[in-house]
């Protein structure tokens, strides 16, 4: 059996003053150093065209949605997050979605929908924030997913550049 003999603390040590003084000196020293933490949400996250945020639907400059309701993104989605119902149109593209929902709680931001789309109609946006009070509120319908082409242009050009490499 080993007996460990504890050292008697001095009065100075029993007051914990050295530890308190040391701790406060570290705190004060750090106060004047540059911040390394981001002041979120006041200070937003940096985004670029490479950012793979939530998917959004492109609205062409003529005001029509680019989607032709082919269902390829729905089939490619590994999380079964996309639900599409198509309808006929009078325009030459003939079909467009009547309903296009993405369940953002299911979406894993994989980008497969973007890759699958043959019509440049769905792209990953730079929108990263997601919050609501109900689960249903996070099922985005077509109106919440639509974005003008000008807003998606940077990402569209980036994806084209990447695809052109092959
Ligand atoms: S990013 Fe991935 S998980 Fe999200 S909707 Fe597109 S295919 Fe589905
Ligand atoms: S793959 Fe493109 S065109 Fe087809 S349904 Fe999805 S978003 Fe629309």
Image (cartoon, rainbow, N blue to C red):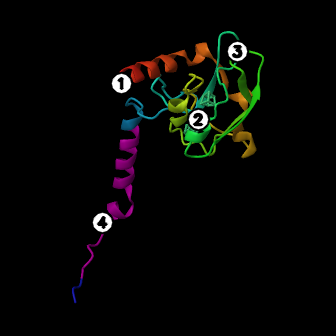
Q: Give the alpha-carbon distance from disc 3 to disc 1, as whole Å.
A: 31 Å
Residue 104 to residue 149: above or below = below
Determine crowd level at label 2: few under 14, some 14-19, many 20+ residues with C-alpha closer than 10 A: many
Where disc 3 sits, the SS reads loop
Looking at marks 4 and 2 on the same chain, the residue that comes earlier in the sequence is marked by 4
Where disc 1 sits, the SS reads loop
Looking at marks 3 and 1 on the same chain, the residue that comes earlier in the sequence is marked by 3
Q: Which residue is mark 4?
A: 10
Q: Give the alpha-carbon distance from disc 1 to disc 4, as whole Å.
A: 74 Å
Query: Are the residues tagged 1 and 4 within 8 Å (C-beta)?
Result: no
Q: Give the alpha-carbon distance from disc 2 to disc 3, as whole Å.
A: 21 Å
- Magenta span has 103? no
In this rendering, the label closer to the viewer, 3 or 1: 3
- Whole-percent x and y of residue 20? 39, 52
Q: Give the alpha-carbon distance from disc 2 to disc 1, as whole Å.
A: 21 Å
Which residues are drawn in magenta? 4-28
Looking at marks 2 and 3 on the same chain, the residue that comes earlier in the sequence is marked by 2
Where disc 2 sits, the SS reads helix
Looking at marks 1 and 4 on the same chain, the residue that comes earlier in the sequence is marked by 4
Q: Left or right: where does residue 47 sit relative to residue 142?
A: left
Please tell me which residue lies in front, 151 or 23. Answer: 151
Q: Which residue is mark 2?
A: 73
Looking at marks 2 and 1 on the same chain, the residue that comes earlier in the sequence is marked by 2
Q: Which residue is mark 1?
A: 166
Q: Which disc, if any, is residue 92?
A: 3
Looking at marks 3 and 4 on the same chain, the residue that comes earlier in the sequence is marked by 4
Query: Are the residues tagged 2 and 1 within 8 Å (C-beta)?
Result: no
In this rendering, the label closer to the viewer, 4 or 2: 2
Query: Are the residues tagged 2 and 3 within 8 Å (C-beta)?
Result: no
């Amino acid at each position: 059996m080993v007996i460990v003999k504890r050292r008697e603390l001095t009065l100075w040590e029993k007051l914990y003053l050295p530890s308190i003084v040391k701790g406060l000196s570290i705190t004060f020293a750090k106060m004047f150093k540059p911040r390394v933490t981001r002041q979120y949400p006041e200070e937003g996250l940096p985004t670029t065209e490479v950012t793979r945020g939530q998917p959004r639907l492109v609205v062409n400059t003529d005001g029509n949605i680019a989607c032709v309701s082919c269902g390829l993104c729905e089939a490619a989605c590994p999380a079964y997050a996309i639900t599409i119902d198509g309808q006929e149109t009078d325009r030459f593209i003939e079909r467009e979605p009547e309903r296009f929902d993405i369940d953002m709680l299911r979406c894993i931001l994989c980008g497969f929908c973007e890759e699958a789309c043959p019509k440049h109609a769905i792209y990953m946006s730079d929108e990263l924030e997601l919050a609501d009070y109900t689960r249903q509120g996070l099922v985005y319908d077509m109106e919440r997913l639509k974005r003008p082409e000008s807003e998606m242009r940077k990402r569209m050009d980036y994806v084209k550049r990447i695809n052109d490499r092959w």
